[in-house]
Image (cartoon, rainbow, N blue to C red):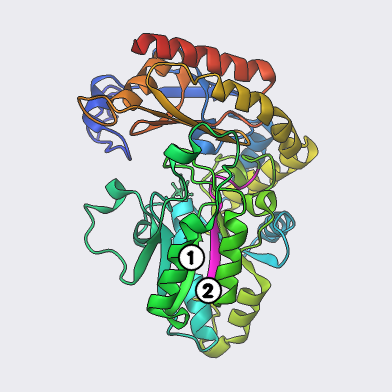
Amino acid sequence: MTQAPANDLSAYWMPFTPNKAFKAAPRLFVAAEGQFYFTADGRKVRDGFSGLWCSGLGHCHPRIAEAIAAQARRLDYSPAFNFATPDAFRLATEIADQFPGALNHVFFTNSGSEAVDTALKMALAYHRARGEGSRTRLIGRINGYHGVGFGGVSVGGMPNNRKAFGPLLPGVDHLPFPYDAKVSGFTRGQPDRDPMAYLAELEALITLHDASTIAAVIVEPMIGSAGVFIPPAGYLARLREITAKHGVLLIFDEVITGFGRLGSPNGATFFGVEPDLCTMAKGVNNAAAPMGAVIASSQIHDTMMDATAFGIEFFHGYTYSAHPLAVAAGLATQAVLREEGVYARAAALAPLFEDLMHGLRDKPHVIDIRNLGLAGGLTLAADPEGPGRRGQALFLAAYEEGLSIRANGDTIAIAPILTSRPEDLEDIFSRLGRAFARLG
Ligand code: PMP
């Protein structure tokens, strides 16, 4: 076998990418440093999206890179089952210290999707362990994104992620999308709207199916992938009240909101609401190696530990759970987050970010803008020739201006690196302004 030529793009089938269009005009990154990528054709591209919401400390952080390199030389792999490394326990403790209340026990996965499926399985197994095995129904939300495993797609509510893949999990319902641009458009931060406008449906479902059949509700504290949609004030607290009243577990999918995006350790802390389970990934180790995790309440953990009829308390896990390289990246990331006060810095930057986001209001085709912490979303009016065209056009125009952002259909998301300085934010938005000008 010979080495493949660098210009042969046919073998790699790319994820969530229009492959044919990409391969006609590829965007290839060969290096990165801090806030910039460097492309194969010699360009420098500012990262306006922290990778994919995940590289909050910037790219190739020396401390994280060094930790991974040293770990690779010391212990590359340790079996995930029946063996562990001391550092895995250390990282679990550091994560648990950042979640509120009884959220105390961390189960490692390798991605957000795996974390979601793990959390759903934990919810089902927990109910069964305490003799409530009839609780099997799961509830997600319209426009929710919970990764691409069959569990996550089933509770997820983005149509394109679901429609090619058959009947999915049975017994899943979806709550309404908790946002209405006609009522809340261009709100800064959290909209002020009666949460029951979006939660009455949950009570109706509980009446319809009976609480004794419902295992869990899963939501993103802030809807991220669909385009940054902020829940109304009081929504998550009300959701917690209703679920708790009926013995239904509440899962926060914190894959985006974990580790600083909202200027706080996680959405549970930011919103002051304590769920039973949280998923995380991305920022946990700055995405320098694949890692995800679930944190469970002591109630769930201890119940499972007591139900030892099978010897192993939870029949679940991955070959790469708590992979030493990912853990090394995690410990280095957590040290930087802590020592450099990154959450507080991100919170301090949020008002400027909000102003810059809402400064786009008069740009062509903009019909809504939303923001929270260092997450921003805007919606473009769909091109009469087809939805998604304007979003993709702005994404490409931004790239021409040396800026990486994210488009999902006609919604655009911006997620600056958490350690940005004000001038970094200004630069993101001046590049974006020029990208809009290219759209005409
Ligand atoms: N849940 C949420 C809320 C996410 O935003 C994502 C990824 N954007 C996932 C799950 C899936 O994570 P991964 O791509 O690592 O599987």
Q: Are marks 1 and 2 in contact (CB under 8 Å)?
A: yes
Q: Which part of the image, by quadrant, shows the C terminus?
A: top left
- Position in image of residue 69 (x %, y %): 62, 39
- Position in image of residue 281 (x %, y %): 54, 49
Mark 2 is surrounded, within 10 Å at the Cα level, by few (under 14), some (14 to 19) or many (20 or more) other residues, namely: many
Identity, as a three-letter code, of the amino acid under mark 1: Val
Q: Is residue 37 highlighted in magenta? A: no
Q: Foreground residue, 327 or 210?
A: 210
Mark 1 is surrounded, within 10 Å at the Cα level, by few (under 14), some (14 to 19) or many (20 or more) other residues, namely: many
- Residue 56, by quadrant, is top right
Which label sits on residue 248? 2
- Residue 213, by quadrant, is bottom left
Q: Foreground residue, 225 or 311?
A: 225
Q: Is residue 276 visible?
A: no
Identity, as a three-letter code, of the amino acid under mark 2: Val
Sequence-first disc among 1 and 2: 1
Q: 384 left or right of 78?
A: left
- Residue 67, by quadrant, is top right
- Position in image of residue 291 (x %, y %): 54, 50
| Residue at screen point 27% across, 22% down | 7
Q: Secondary structure at mark 2?
A: loop
| Residue at screen point 43% across, 64% down | 201
What stretch of residues is rendered in magenta? Answer: 248-259
Q: Is residue 24 above or below residue 88?
A: above
The residue that disc 1 covers is 217
